[in-house]
């Protein structure tokens, strides 16, 4: 860690030196062009003497170098954090929805929902997803309705002021496994399990973190002694957590017949939790394509308008010729 900090400091010093050389040769040079001349006429920098210009230029270079030094020191401090805050960073995996025009993998989301329902939902909630969101995403309307009807929700009051149980509707959001946070903490050793609705965006690495956490359980290396009830996972902050490994090979049977290996289940549940955190992902990209298409047409129209109409008006000269007496 100390070697890394020294290297970053040296690199910052070299960057400052190179920046000063470049600034001394080019920063204060007047590149003549119509735009630069117009800016120069409007700027108070034009009226300054040479020494003041040099002072301002050196001040800017010193500020940039100082910012680089502070950044390198800040990173070195982050690298020397206590052991309880250290964790491994997951690799960047090629997710099917990461492209600029790529959509969610509907089949993977459906399988991920099966993993969530069978494995995760016993302890974790997912407050961002309603059953209607599964419609036309990874299920048909009838399938989403049937899936919601399997869950009983408390509703009311009725006409006599009593609460009652009813089958779920597609407008209902996923139900929490515990009635309140105190019950969740009591059932899990004093700490309530976090909600998974925004977990993908709440951790560095997004879905890469989810995949790494699900597949990263292993025996602790030599020299690391865990407290009773903790499990070693290098991708979790501090390296240990109370949640036992939730996934293993053939933890469930997929409805579509896909082999339910541990890595496949982790990939699918990560895709589902990404969908839970950003259900409007596909709509956002569709809107972006529409906007870019319209802007492209507008750009062509504006170029034509500027070339054939505005340029003529801008360069037109009006001459007044008085009548001869």
Image (cartoon, grey):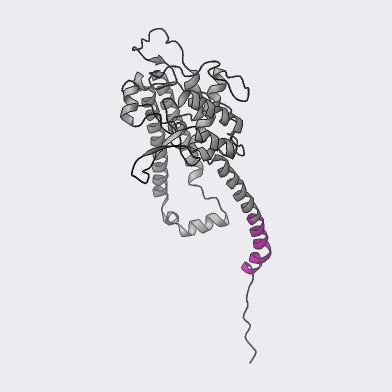
Report if residue 301 lies within the magenta region: yes
Query: In the rendered view, does 170 fall on the left or right side of 322?
Result: left
Residue 235 in the magenta stretch? The answer is no
Q: Is residue 207 above or below residue 298?
A: above
Q: Residue 291 versus residue 243: which sits nearer the camera?
A: 243
* Residue 247 pos. (x, y %): 50, 18
Residue at 45% x, 57% y is 43
Quadrant of the frame with the N terminus: top left
Q: Position of residue 285 (x, y in %)?
A: 58, 43
Residue lying farthest to the front in this orientation = 160
Q: Quadrant of residue 243?
A: top left
- Decide if residue 25 is on the left or right side of residue 123: right
Extent of the magenta region? 298-317
The image shows residue 201, relative to residue 210, as above or below, that is below
How far across and down, in percent of the image, does residue 86 sit? 39, 21
Where 317 falls versus 258 (above or below)?
Answer: below
Residue 92 appears in the rendering: no
Residue at the extreme top of the image, as rendered:
222
Q: Residue 131: x percent and y percent?
A: 51, 37
Q: Is residue 247 left or right of residue 257?
A: left
Residue 50 or residue 158, whichever sits in front = 158
Image quadrant assignment for residue 304: bottom right
Q: Is residue 192 above or below residue 37?
A: above
Which is the main secondary structure of the residues drawn in magenta? helix
All told, the count of numbered labels is: 0
Residue 212 visible: yes
> Which quarter of the rendered picture does the C terminus lie within?
bottom right
């Amino acid at each position: 860690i100390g070697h890394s900090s020294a290297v970053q400091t040296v690199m910052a010093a070299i960057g400052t030196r190179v920046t000063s050389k470049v600034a001394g040769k080019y920063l204060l040079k007047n590149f003549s062009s119509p735009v630069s001349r117009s800016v120069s006429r409007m700027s108070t920098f034009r009226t300054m003497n040479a020494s003041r210009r040099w002072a301002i230029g050196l001040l800017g270079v010193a500020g940039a170098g100082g910012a680089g030094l502070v950044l390198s020191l800040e990173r070195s401090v982050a690298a020397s954090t206590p052991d309880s805050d250290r964790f491994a960073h997951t690799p960047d995996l090629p997710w099917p929805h990461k492209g600029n025009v790529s959509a969610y993998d509907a089949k993977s989301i459906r399988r991920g929902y099966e993993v969530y329902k069978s494995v995760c939902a016993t302890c974790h909630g997912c407050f961002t997803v309603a059953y209607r969101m599964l419609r036309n995403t990874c299920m048909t309307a009838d399938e989403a309705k049937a899936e919601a009807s399997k869950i009983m929700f408390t509703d009311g009051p009725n006409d006599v002021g009593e609460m009652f149980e009813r089958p779920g509707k597609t407008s209902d959001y996923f139900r929490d496994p515990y009635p309140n946070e105190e019950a969740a903490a009591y059932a899990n050793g004093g700490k309530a399990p976090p909600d998974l609705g925004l977990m993908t965006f709440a951790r560095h690495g997004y879905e890469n973190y989810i995949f790494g956490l699900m597949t990263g359980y292993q025996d602790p290396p030599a020299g690391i002694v865990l407290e009773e009830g903790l499990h070693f996972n290098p991708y979790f902050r501090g390296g240990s957590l109370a949640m036992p490994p939730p996934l293993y090979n053939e933890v469930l049977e997929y409805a579509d017949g896909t082999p339910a290996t541990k890595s496949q289940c982790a990939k699918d549940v990560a895709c589902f939790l990404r969908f839970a955190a950003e259900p409007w992902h596909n709509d956002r990209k569709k809107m972006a394509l529409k906007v870019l298409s319209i802007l492209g047409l507008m750009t062509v129209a504006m170029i034509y308008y500027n070339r054939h109409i505005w340029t003529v008006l801008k360069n037109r000269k009006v001459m007044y010729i008085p009548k001869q007496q």
